[in-house]
Image (cartoon, coloured by chain):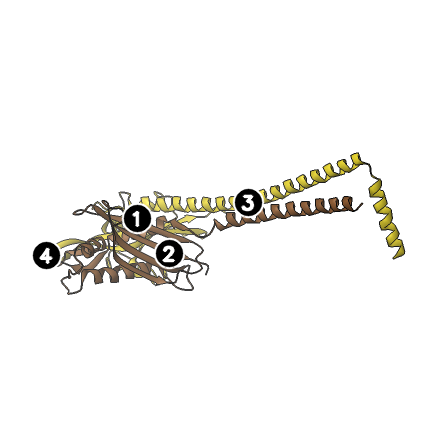
Amino acid sequence: MIKKNKLGQQEILGFVLIVLLVTIMGVVFLSFSIGKSRPTKQTSAEISNLLEASMYHTTECAVNYVPQYREVQDLIKECYKNPEQKCLNGKGVCVVLESTFKELIDQSLTVSEVSPNKAYILKIQYSSLNSLNETIEILKFEEGIFKNCSSKPGGSHSIAVTLSSGTIDTELEVCRGEI
Amino acid sequence: MKSQNLVVNYTKMKILKIPKSKRSQLQIQEMAFMLVAVLFFFVLVGLFIASLMYSNLKEDATEIAETRTLTSVTNLADSPEFSCVLSKSNCVDEDKLISLINKTSYMNFWTFSSLKVVKFGAFNKSEKEMIKCTRANYPECELFLVYDKDISNERAISSYVALCRKEYENGYTYDKCELARLVAGTGLKT
């Protein structure tokens, strides 16, 4: 009689264990599927357009004579090739590049706590086509804090460097959140 | 208490009296119920995941629609009416733009309900604060209003473009480009 009772108890225990196992498996599976929808880096046409249009912006820097004012993309190349180069107004090419580019991005994205754009990060780096690991950082600036981003749209723009076989890539990533 | 004990004893006796074949049937039934429960659980989980995937699909569809509209605005910048003479993509010729102002014939040429170009200096200004471009104040102005059909239910889509014009300084002519925003309005269907 005791043996039969025990057998029943064991069956119930086994059933409970199976149910628990299935539930745990389901929870793990769900957590994986939900975890995948976390904000990831997205390519945005708007950001890419902003970068492309910014490249043509005429700066206040003329290197040879006035009015041969350089565009942002010219200053990027100049800042990579000869960072010590100065404009005719006495300012360094890299200094003018940073101030002009920062002003363009700040005015376009309007980063603040009360706006949809919470933060951004801009990187300009040279990548050699000969060796995969050779990257040289030319410029990097950011605004705001990358925290609680609901999405991270980004874009990039490449400039070919004629003398050396490589490209200068400009990457912009924006942190978007709830207002 | 006594009656409760009696009921328990009666049930135990009843269980013991069940023949072996019946007990097997019960066990099969138990297993069948369990299988149904597991299947039901998986169906629920599947439905939940399907709803999640469907919501992502909706987001993707909205994103694709927005990208398509943005592309049409970008294509507009590269159309012969706006494009720069220089070999620059995503560039609007400011000198062409000023000649397009107040030309009503373009209202029916493009599918947009309104079309304007905002210069870099006026990005954070409201439309009322901006200085509208005319032939008299060009290029010292901020907003090029190509046309506006004054539709109340309108959604505006903007794209960044380079706005270039010819400038003259020290006896030289050069191209002066600045960042601008091409804003196109689309009437919403209700």
Chain to which mark 3 belongs? B
Q: Which residue is mark 3?
A: B49
The answer to the question of whether label 4 and label 3 lie on touching residues, with beta carbons closer than 8 A, is: no
Discs 1 and 3 share one subunit: yes
Colour of chain B, in one word, is yellow
* Badge 1: residue crowd in 10 Å (few <14, some 14–19, many ≥20): few
Colour of chain A, in one word, is brown
The answer to the question of whether label 2 and label 1 lie on touching residues, with beta carbons closer than 8 A, is: no
Query: Is residue B115 shown to the viewer in this render?
Result: no
Question: Cα distance, mark 4 to mark 1?
Answer: 33 Å
Discs 2 and 4 share one subunit: no
Where's residue B6, x and y in %? 88, 51
Marker disc for residue B171: 4
Q: Residue A38 vs residue B16: left or right?
A: left
Can you say whether B31 is above or below A179 in the image? above
Amino acid type of the residue that numbered disc 2 sits on in the rendered structure? Val
Work out which quarter of the rendered image holds the N terminus of chain A and state it.
top right
Discs 4 and 1 share one subunit: yes
The answer to the question of whether label 1 and label 3 lie on touching residues, with beta carbons closer than 8 A, is: no
Marker disc for residue A174: 2
Give whichever of B182, A105 is nearer the camera.
Answer: A105
The answer to the question of whether label 2 and label 3 lie on touching residues, with beta carbons closer than 8 A, is: no
Q: Residue A72 vs residue A12: left or right?
A: left
Work out which quarter of the rendered image holds the C terminus of chain A and state it.
bottom left
Question: Cα distance, mark 2 to mark 3?
Answer: 29 Å
Q: Residue B113 vs residue A136: left or right?
A: right
Q: Which residue is mark 1?
A: B103
Amino acid type of the residue that numbered disc 1 sits on in the rendered structure? Lys
Amino acid type of the residue that numbered disc 3 sits on in the rendered structure? Ile
Can you say whether A29 is above or below A121 in the image? above
Amino acid type of the residue that numbered disc 4 sits on in the rendered structure? Gly
Discs 2 and 3 share one subunit: no
